[in-house]
Amino acid sequence: MGTKVAVIGSGNIGTDLMIKILRLSEKLEIAAMVGIDPASDGLARAGRLGVATTAEGVDGLIAMDGFDDIEIIFDATSAGAHLANAKKLEPYGKILIDLTPAAIGPFVVPAVNLDIHEGARNINMVTCGGQATIPIVAAVSRVAPVPYAEIVASIASKSAGPGTRANIDEFTETTAHAIEKVGGATRGKAIIVLNPADPPLIMRDTVLCLVDAPSAVEREEITASVEAMVKTVSGYVPGYRLKQQVQITPVPGDQPVHTLAGDAPVTHQVSVFLEVEGAAHYLPAYAGNLDIMTSAAIAAAERIAS
C-alpha cells in the first residue's frame, strides 16, 4: 500500500492526476477525489474507478471516513480557492501540493530544487510554463550569470480551461518570480499564448537568456548543461524534449540590452526551443501544458512519500 493522497478539483488537471496515480504510481494510493459539482465528469469517473468522492469541497473531504489516513493532498482548483482550502486544512497537518498560482508555499520544480523543500507543508508547482522552462534557466545559470531570462509558453487554446483563463495574470507574475527565485535569473519575464489553431498544436516553449559567457568553453558547458537538464525532466515527463539544438549567439555591442539586464555584462543570448507532448492518459496529447503539471506534482509527491 502506498502513501494515501487526495485530489481537490475534479476538472481536467485533477482527473489527470487521479488517473496517473492509479495507472502509474507505485508509491501513492488515491483515497479521495474532491469537487464542488456533483455532475462533474471527474467525480463520475472517480466513482466508476472505485475512488471515494465528495461534491462538498474541502469540508466534505475533512468529514470523509479515512481522512486521517491521508497524508498528501493535491489542490488543482484555482489560486483563490487554494487560499481558502489551505486555511481549512492547516490544523490537520497534511502536506499540500498546490497546482494553482496561489504560491503560499515555496516554488518547487522537481528537477531543480525539490531537495531543498522536501520538509515544507505546502509546496507550489509554479505553472505549466514554469515547470517547462525554469529547469532550462537553472541549467544556464549554473554555468554562467543570467541577468535576464524571458520565457514564452504557447499552449493550445482548447487545453486552457476556465481555471487557467481566470488565472492568466497570476500565471505571468508567478512564473516570472519563479524564473528568478528558482531559475537563478536576476530578472525574469513570462508570456503565455493561447494558440487557437485547429487542429490544436502541442505545447511549445521558448526560453531566452542573456548571459555573460565570453569563453567558448563556457558556451559549450551551457549547451551540455541544458541537454542534461532536458534528460532529467524527461525522466518524469516523457514528452518533454528539445525542438532543435541549443542556440548561443553573440549580442552586438550596440544592442540596447541594458533595458533588460541593467548594468550587468552581457555577451551572448541563449535560445532554447522546447515542446511538451502529453501522455494522453486522460487529456489529448496536445495538452502537454497540463501533463507537465500533473507529472511534476506526482514526481514531487513520490519523492516526499519516500
Image: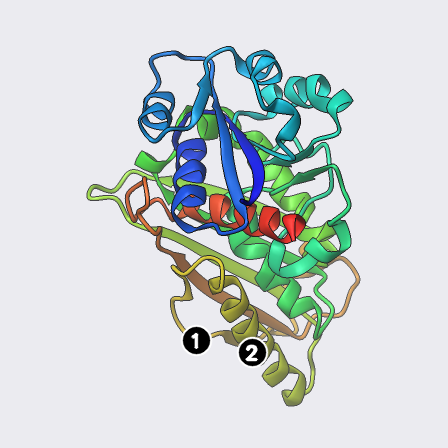
Label 1 residue SS: loop
* Residue occupying image coordinates x 69% and y 23%: 86
Using the image as rendered, state which of residue 194 and residue 296 is in the foreground. 296
Q: Residue type at mark 1?
A: Gln
Q: Is residue 265 above or below residue 5?
A: below
Using the image as rendered, state which of residue 291 and residue 54 is in the foreground. 54
Q: Is residue 217 left or right of residue 77?
A: right
Color encoding of the figure: rainbow
Disc 1 packing (10 Å; few <14; some 14–19; many ≥20):
few
Q: Is residue 214 left or right of residue 151?
A: right
| Position in image of residue 284 (x %, y %) | 28, 43
Number of marks drawn: 2
Q: Is residue 241 left or right of residue 62?
A: left
Q: Is residue 18 left or right of residue 64?
A: left
* Residue occupying image coordinates x 73% and y 57%: 115
Which residue position is annotated with label 1? 245
**In the rendered image, is residue 288 in sight?**
yes
Which residue position is annotated with label 2? 223
CB of mark 1 within 8 Å of CB of mark 2?
A: yes
| Position in image of residue 140 (x %, y %) | 64, 69
Q: Residue type at mark 2?
A: Thr
| Position in image of residue 131 (x %, y %) | 55, 51
Mark 1 or mark 2: which comes first in sequence? 2
**In the rendered image, is residue 185 in sight?**
no
Label 2 residue SS: helix
- Cα distance in 3D space between marks 1 and 2: 9 Å
Q: Residue furthest left?
A: 199
* Residue occupying image coordinates x 64% and y 45%: 176
| Position in image of residue 296 (x %, y %) | 53, 50
Using the image as rendered, state which of residue 127 and residue 176 is in the foreground. 127
Disc 2 packing (10 Å; few <14; some 14–19; many ≥20):
many
